[in-house]
Image: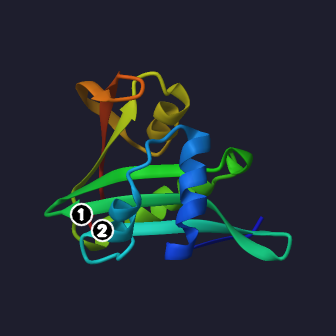
């Protein structure tokens, strides 16, 4: 399957919302997304598109931010029909490459304590547990693990 990764367009926000709903991510609201997809020097927002019935369909996305020497994966999701195909890994690695170009030393993220598949995904991509946030998530209320990856300097 051919996957293209590039900036998120305004017109794709409805598909992003659908991916969030299907993967049980929390929707941030339209204003937040419109701010994030402006893609300035501190925010990174990308979508993975797959060729489906002759057109390119959003099947995954990632949003990250860069603050001094730290990168944070704020949100990543892949449509359930396209999971386990390496799309999430490709999105994550593209964000890591950009973080390295920003001279980030660490990349952080939070993950639901119960999301064993996501935790294993991050471990497989060289993240380690480094902290814990009590009642970090709402709907339902749940604790989060903080995970960190040390980035190589370019």
Residue 38 sits above or below residue 149 on the image: below
At 52% across and 59% down in the image, what residue appears? 61
At 48% across and 68% down in the image, what residue appears? 46
Residue 67 sits above or below residue 37 on the image: above
Q: Secondary structure at mark 1?
A: strand
The C terminus sits in image quarter: bottom left
Q: Nearer the viewer, mark 2 or mark 1?
A: 2
Of all residues, the one furthest to the left in this rendering is 68
Q: Is residue 98 visible?
A: no
At 35% across and 22% down in the image, what residue appears? 141
Q: Is residue 40 visible?
A: yes
Q: Which mark, residue 43?
A: 2
Residue 88 sits above or below residue 36 on the image: above
Mark 2 neighbour density, 10 Å: few (under 14) some (14–19) many (20 or more)? some
In this rendering, position of residue 125 left or right of residue 52? left
Residue 28 sits above or below residue 148 on the image: below
Q: Position of residue 101 (x, y in %)?
A: 29, 73
Q: Earlier in the sequence, mark 2 or mark 1?
A: 2
Mark 1 neighbour density, 10 Å: few (under 14) some (14–19) many (20 or more)? many
Q: Position of residue 95 (x, y in %)?
A: 41, 63
Residue 123 location, quadrant: top left
Mark 2 and mark 1 residues within 8 Å of each other at the beta carbon: yes
Q: Position of residue 108 (x, y in %)?
A: 28, 46
Please name whichever residue, 37 or 120, is drawn nearer the observer in this view of the structure.
37
Q: Which mark, residue 12?
A: none
Of all residues, the one furthest to the front in this rendering is 30
In this rendering, position of residue 104 left or right of residue 27? left
Please name whichever residue, 15 or 151, is drawn nearer the observer in this view of the structure.
15
At 59% across and 66% down in the image, what residue appears? 48
Please name whichever residue, 49 or 100, is drawn nearer the observer in this view of the structure.
49
In this rendering, position of residue 25 left or right of residue 23? left
Residue beneath disc 1: 66
């Amino acid at each position: 399957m051919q996957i293209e990764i590039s900036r998120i367009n305004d017109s794709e926000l409805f598909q992003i919302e659908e991916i969030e709903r299907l993967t049980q991510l929390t929707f941030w609201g339209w204003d937040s997304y419109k701010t994030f997809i402006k893609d300035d020097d501190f925010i990174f927002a990308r979508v993975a598109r797959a060729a489906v019935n002759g057109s390119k369909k959003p099947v995954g996305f990632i949003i990250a931010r860069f603050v001094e020497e730290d990168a944070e994966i704020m949100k990543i999701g892949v449509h359930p029909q396209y999971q386990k195909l390496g799309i999430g890994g490709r999105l994550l690695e593209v964000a890591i490459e950009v973080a390295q170009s920003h001279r980030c030393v660490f990349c952080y993220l939070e993950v639901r304590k119960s999301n064993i598949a996501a935790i294993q995904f991050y471990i497989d991509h060289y993240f380690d547990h480094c902290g814990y946030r009590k009642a970090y998530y709402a709907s339902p209320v749940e604790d989060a693990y903080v995970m960190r990856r040390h980035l190589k300097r370019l």
